[in-house]
Image (spheres, rainbow, N blue to C red):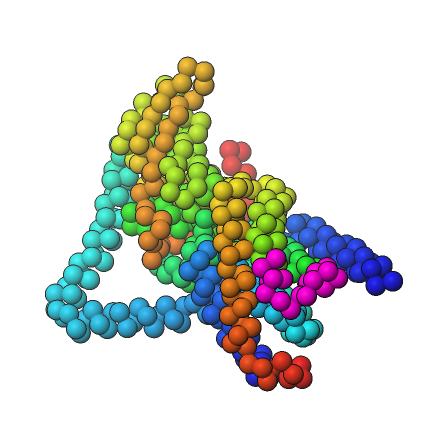
């Protein structure tokens, strides 16, 4: 129950961070941390609520955020076969992959919605995402209370 | 075995996703759901802090600094904004009256009313493909898709996705924005197209012989029916005539500072009020007349 409150506070702070840095997802590192802790119910709820938030405030048709957050789980499951997915190196790799995915996903969704796509902006945002993601993940891992990790969901 | 299960899960996931995406493209239900929930959550996360900040700043301004002078300045500033808007409207109406004074029948333009709203966020989130602002008025306040958004200085854009008590408006600088405009003096029509934040707007399909000049104000033409005619939108900065094109190459800059906008006006069309207390006989006549097609 306390961890749910913690995640709600995190969402609040992340939305404010998104207001300050447009185009970057500050919620995604939280999802990776949750996936690493194997909290399945939280993962489902987070994907549903955060997809609604991101697609609600975004300008693309519904679907971008579902693919975006699903890709984190795919990276995690795929990475688990080759790497230590709890390490900082994996967070760096995941940030880099998400950064590369951002322009690709926006281009695909813009094309499907018959909208104009601006490559420079999304490539820049992808670079920002790749830089911010591991730093934020590290911060979250540091401040996330240890006692919540074993809290029953 | 594990790999096989993963592959099946991915295929099923893709199938479900594509089904939902296709269904949403046709019905728009998921877009509406995301608009109503996502925008609401973000509004109630951002707005209370913005409100507290504004109140604190206002309190400091009023009671720490020169109280009387500040209040008077606030009052005059707000009056100035309204007067500018009024002058623009009257100027447009005066020129319109001159153009149409020889006509016998002038159809009155439908009336519009304004409603103030506050900008609570600019473009945000990874899927923010549009140059947009989020405002604190939604469907509850009568805001719908394509509701025009403006300031006393000119047009800002239009609402693209209304939420319950918040809405998302696309700015006219966005590359997907198209507004039908005409020159305030020379009345040449064109299509104002956005070219991205910080970039000049371009006016398409303005005829080569159009007498448009640098410095002319472009106003909404009202041809598309979304905006009322005569609202100032942009100022022409360059006009180039091409030998190979049938149209002028015109650039313009928006009249509104898109980056630092805090408050906006929403325009609502006022529906004509029908006299419901009239007798049954009159009502019948009205309803019979309303069914007769125009021109018959």
State the residue at coordinates (39%, 36%).
B201
Q: Is residue A144 visible?
A: yes
Question: Where residue A86 appears, x then y in whole percent?
Answer: 64, 69
Q: Quadrant for residue B277, please give it.
A: bottom left
Instruction: Give the total of numbered labels.
Output: 0
Region rendered in magenta: A76-93
Residue B93 screen position, x and y as percent: 28, 40
Left or right: B94 as drawn, with respect to A71: left
In the displayed image of the protein, which residue is found farthest to the right?
B1
Q: Main secondary structure of the magenta part?
A: helix
Where's residue A65, x and y in %?
Answer: 61, 58
Work out whether residue A66 can be spotted. Answer: no
Q: Residue B9 falls in which quadrant of the image? A: bottom right
Q: Position of residue B71 (x, y in %)?
A: 17, 66
Residue closest to the eye, B185 or B198 = B198
Taking the magenta stretch, the answer to whether it contains residue A88 is yes
Residue at x 36%, y 46% (from the top left corner): B155
Name the one closer to the observer, B9 or B276.
B9
Q: Does B93 appear above or below A93?
A: above
Query: Hey, which quadrant is residue A74 in on the image?
Result: bottom right
Residue B216 horizontal side relative to residue B248, left or right: left
Query: Is residue B41 in the magenta section?
Result: no
**Residue at horizontal 47 percent and vertical 70 percent from the top:** A13
Task: Please tell me which residue is depicted at 47% across the width and 40% down the height of the picture.
Answer: B175
Q: Which quadrant does the N terminus of chain B fall into?
A: bottom right
Residue lying farthest to the top in this orientation: B243
């Amino acid at each position: 129950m306390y961890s749910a409150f913690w995640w709600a506070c995190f969402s609040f702070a992340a939305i404010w961070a998104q207001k300050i840095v447009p185009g970057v997802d500050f919620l995604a590192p939280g999802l990776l941390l949750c996936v690493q802790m194997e909290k399945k119910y939280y993962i489902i709820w987070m994907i549903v609520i955060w997809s609604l938030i991101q697609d609600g405030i975004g300008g693309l048709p519904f679907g971008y955020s579902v693919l975006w957050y699903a890709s984190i789980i795919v990276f995690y499951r795929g990475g688990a076969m080759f790497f230590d997915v709890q390490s900082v190196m994996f967070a760096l790799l995941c940030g880099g992959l998400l950064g590369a995915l951002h322009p690709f996903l926006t281009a695909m969704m813009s094309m499907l919605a018959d909208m104009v796509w601006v490559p420079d902006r999304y490539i820049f945002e992808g670079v920002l995402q790749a830089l911010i993601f591991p730093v934020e993940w590290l911060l979250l891992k540091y401040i996330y209370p240890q006692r919540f990790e074993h809290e029953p969901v | 075995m594990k790999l096989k299960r993963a592959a099946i899960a991915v295929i099923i996931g893709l199938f479900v996703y594509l089904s939902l995406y296709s269904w949403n493209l046709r019905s728009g239900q998921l877009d509406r759901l995301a608009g109503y929930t996502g925008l609401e959550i973000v509004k109630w996360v951002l707005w209370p802090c913005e409100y507290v900040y504004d109140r604190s700043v206002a309190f400091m301004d009023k009671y720490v600094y020169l109280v009387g002078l500040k209040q008077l300045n606030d009052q005059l500033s707000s009056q100035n904004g309204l007067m500018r808007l009024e002058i623009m409207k009257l100027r447009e109406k005066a020129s319109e009256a001159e153009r149409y004074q020889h006509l016998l029948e002038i159809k009155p333009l439908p009336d519009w009313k304004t409603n103030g709203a506050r900008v609570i966020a600019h473009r945000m989130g990874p899927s923010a493909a549009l140059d947009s602002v989020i405002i604190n008025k939604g469907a509850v306040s009568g805001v719908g898709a394509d509701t025009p958004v403006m300031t006393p200085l000119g047009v800002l854009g239009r609402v693209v996705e209304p939420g319950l008590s918040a809405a998302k408006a696309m700015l006219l600088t966005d590359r997907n924005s198209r507004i039908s405009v005409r020159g305030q003096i020379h009345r040449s029509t064109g299509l104002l197209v956005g070219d991205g934040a910080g970039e000049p707007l371009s006016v398409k399909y303005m005829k080569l012989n159009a007498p448009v000049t640098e410095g002319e104000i472009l106003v909404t033409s009202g041809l598309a029916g979304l905006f009322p005619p005569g609202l100032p939108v942009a100022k022409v900065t360059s006009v180039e005539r091409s030998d190979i094109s049938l149209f002028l190459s015109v650039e313009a800059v928006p009249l509104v500072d898109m980056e630092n906008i805090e408050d906006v006006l929403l325009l609502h069309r006022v529906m004509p009020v029908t006299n419901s207390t009239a007798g049954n006989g009159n009502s019948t006549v009205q309803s019979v007349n309303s069914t007769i097609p125009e021109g018959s």
